[in-house]
Amino acid sequence: MNRSNPPSADRSKSHGSDFLQLRIEEAPAGGRSEWLARQLRQAIADRRLPVGSRLPAGRVLAAELRVSRGVVTDAYQRLIEDGHAAGRGRNGTVVVAAPLPPAAPPGSSPSGPVAAPTSAALFGSPPGDDVFDAVRAVPARIDLWPGAPDLAAFPRSAWLRAERAVLADLPAAGLGYGDPRGTPELRGALAEWLARNRAIRVDPAEVLVVAGTAQTFGLLGRVLRDDGIAAVAVEDPGALGARQHLRHQGLATPPVPVDDQGVRVDALADTGAPAVLLTPAHQFPTGVVLSGARRRELMAWATGSGGLIIEDDYDAEHRYDRPPVPALRSILPEHVCHAGSVSKLLAPALRIGWVVAPPRHREALIAAKRFADLGNAALPQQVLARLMRSGALERQLRLLRTRHRRRRDAMVRAIADHLPGAVVHGAAAGLHLTITFDAAFADTDLAAAALVCGVRVQPLSWHRQRPGPPGLVLGYAASTPTDITEGLAVLGRALRRLS
Amino acid sequence: MNRSNPPSADRSKSHGSDFLQLRIEEAPAGGRSEWLARQLRQAIADRRLPVGSRLPAGRVLAAELRVSRGVVTDAYQRLIEDGHAAGRGRNGTVVVAAPLPPAAPPGSSPSGPVAAPTSAALFGSPPGDDVFDAVRAVPARIDLWPGAPDLAAFPRSAWLRAERAVLADLPAAGLGYGDPRGTPELRGALAEWLARNRAIRVDPAEVLVVAGTAQTFGLLGRVLRDDGIAAVAVEDPGALGARQHLRHQGLATPPVPVDDQGVRVDALADTGAPAVLLTPAHQFPTGVVLSGARRRELMAWATGSGGLIIEDDYDAEHRYDRPPVPALRSILPEHVCHAGSVSKLLAPALRIGWVVAPPRHREALIAAKRFADLGNAALPQQVLARLMRSGALERQLRLLRTRHRRRRDAMVRAIADHLPGAVVHGAAAGLHLTITFDAAFADTDLAAAALVCGVRVQPLSWHRQRPGPPGLVLGYAASTPTDITEGLAVLGRALRRLS
């Protein structure tokens, strides 16, 4: 038996297991559970326990070590809590992630990319349609994926109270097949919300409730295609997910460059596309705000060519260091299809969004929604309408702003500490920021190396159609300042190994 | 002023309004509110107050009649409650439906069809894509539209309790973007439900949660088209809505006749279609159960030709006078795509359903769901999973069976009383029955005439692709026995006027 790595316990007082040659001392520092957890973490770190391997049944290991079963259960629980292992019910406890690699000692030569082949392949270029799900399926201890707000701040009590009130008041007929446009209550509340927060004046009858902005892209793609539109220009860089949704509906997505004033309208006109998808309030992923001059050019383009602007207003309510930006829809109602959702206000898991379409596409969009699913579920619509009308949603937004700003600040500090060569973009608003590097390496390799170390980020190149400097898109809203700082430290180490 | 129709009050003691020339007596029978409601109903009946007209402001009418404002408000409320009027907020109270036509005195000559032109147009043949919404938008006092269970029996308290438990237990990450296939908890609960109730053995990983069967048809339509399938044969008669959804995806829907053993498999083979949509447990709308011989023929067709069977198991759990019918999926897993939902178990407004696809279409169907809306909302999935696992859903089903059977019996009796010439089909199970008439008239005229009198039903011809005898599809589950009896009385009178 290989005994090259024996624990330092006093052999005469120890009991042992063949598993990892564990030998427990009489009274280890920190207690027996902590001792066992430490041994297992070490074994995972030096690959004696590879990812995917199963830990022995607690009953068995406890007997071999002559400790109570609770000691083993507790140690396993610690590994689960810190992301090294996962409990799989009857399948026992399985190793799911290696811990952080130790920081390279100063002056030591880098050991080359640490990306496991599977992770590198996951991020491959060009990214496939299922890249989001594939990368998200890998366990990660620290998730800096952009797009989610602070989910721990979800107003669970207010939601439950509103649901109780809805269930008390709703007539039985409200549980039947409803209006595919959404409930009158929610459409009314949304019209008021849009007026208060986005300066959009709209009749409730013109608001269509949908299952999030992803559904908006799908429905709109179908409607535009049926209307003879074959291409929707998109920002470059611009969200990969949105582009994938439009392409799934058979639309081309010619790229339009974005500079420090936002989308380049001259280049938009050059594409000849009759429609464009924009994120004017906080461009994804660069964070640029569309300037006044560009807004005027865009208005001239839309009114001159009859062009359609799809305004993805995905995080316009979240701003820290700058005044609010009015929605394009508030200026150009005839030419703008305005899309929003509660994914960044409450939670993506609610799958509630809205579209305010220009008159010429309104009826077709309602028909598309009816054929998609006959309309959103009624109860969550009624609950949300109550939260909007009671002011609870505005309170939630204020709470999120405070929490998100703190997290944003922690991330900016951690970038300065751990990625001193990175340039930060678009941190004045939103739930994410973008960093770029003045260096030549594949950002997909960096993202893959980080994922191997348990930190999930998006490579900037995912969101580009044409080449550009490497970078990362980093969500800060859904992670604690501690996790953000630790995550950036991992990224810093991974980058040093790459370069 | 026209005083041809004065009330019989003692003029010396009455006060009056120019509106309808109302003159109120000192102490009318039943009280002043009842008197006023009666006058208004009469005026609506003889079209002095047409549908769409607005009632005077309560304050004004009360002053003119020298009664308290509460008397008028109360009278208006009675009209709203019995479906003659609707409160429209600041727009006041509006007449929305004419009352039942008086029964024709025996021996009097029928006065011809009573269908208003707008209603007749609504039901026009062939029915348009928006026929359901258009007809549903018309107010109806008695709704015999098929498809909904007893919505008053929805387990509101159990739902709220389960939601409280879900909100207490759900980790914050459960509020983010989730698995597009559905939450593991609901997929697990559904696999158990399908095993217990439908004899289907399926791994939870193979269950896809969707937003109801309407979404299933949309997703599947797209997947089949991408797979080179251009036609899905459908039962004739068969559900209009399902046909519309498939056609919206660009699929042809060749009709296959249904006889007293179910779909005619020889005719299915003749169509050459590589796929067929069936309702084997309780054929919609005829209620026929697919016979054992036909099941064997269908298995031979599927295995011989590689054909796909889409099994719409829409109300298989609801049966009264017959043994359960095993799902086709339980016999032919490689060739059957099984679709179900909670619309008929709990409520259509929940928009939760499921699909168990054969292996060859599984991945494409998951991708289609991801592109449609990134997956169902998480909270209702978790609530439903709890209700399924706690046995609450089975209790609900037993409760519904008792209530629905009583309503079914009331409808069968009322048909015998008021439509003695009608033949009843498919009443041994489900939430609806179908009646046919051995006569020559347009069932759309009958449905339109009923709607004018405040009773909503579906004409059988909507669900036919080829001509057949006239009939109606009548839902009984969502209406009280009293309403059912009254609704059938209206249908009886409307039919006598038509013939």
Image (cartoon, coloured by chain):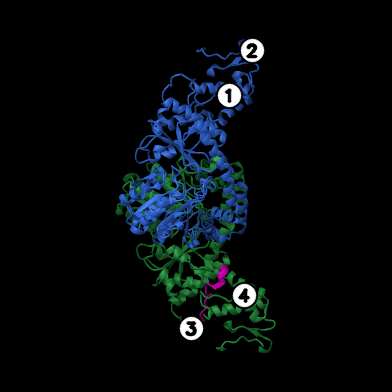
Chain colours: A green, B blue
Residue that label 3 marks: A108
| Disc 1, SS | helix
Instruction: Measuring from the top left, give residue A114's x and y in whole percent.
Output: 45, 76
* In-front residue for pair A104/B243: B243
Instruction: Measuring from the top left, give residue B206's x and y in whole percent.
Output: 46, 61
Q: Residue at x 49, y 71 (%)?
A: A491
Between label 2 and label 4, give the one nearer the viewer. 4
For the residues labelled 1 and 4, the Cα–Cα distance comes to 76 Å
- Mark 2 packing: few (<14 Cα in 10 Å), some, or many (20+)? few
Which numbered tag is attached to residue B37? 1
Residue that label 2 marks: B13
Task: Write the start and end of the magenta stretch as one range.
Answer: A83-109
Residue that label 4 marks: A58
In the image, what residue type sits under mark 3?
Answer: Ser
- Mark 1 packing: few (<14 Cα in 10 Å), some, or many (20+)? some
In the image, what residue type sits under mark 2?
Answer: Lys
| Disc 3, SS | loop
For the residues labelled 3 and 1, the Cα–Cα distance comes to 93 Å
Which badge, 1 or 2, comes first in the chain's sequence? Answer: 2
Disc 2 with disc 3 on a shared chain: no
Relative to A252, say whether A387 is above or below: above
* In-front residue for pair B135/A405: B135
* In-front residue for pair B326/B357: B326
Disc 1 with disc 2 on a shared chain: yes
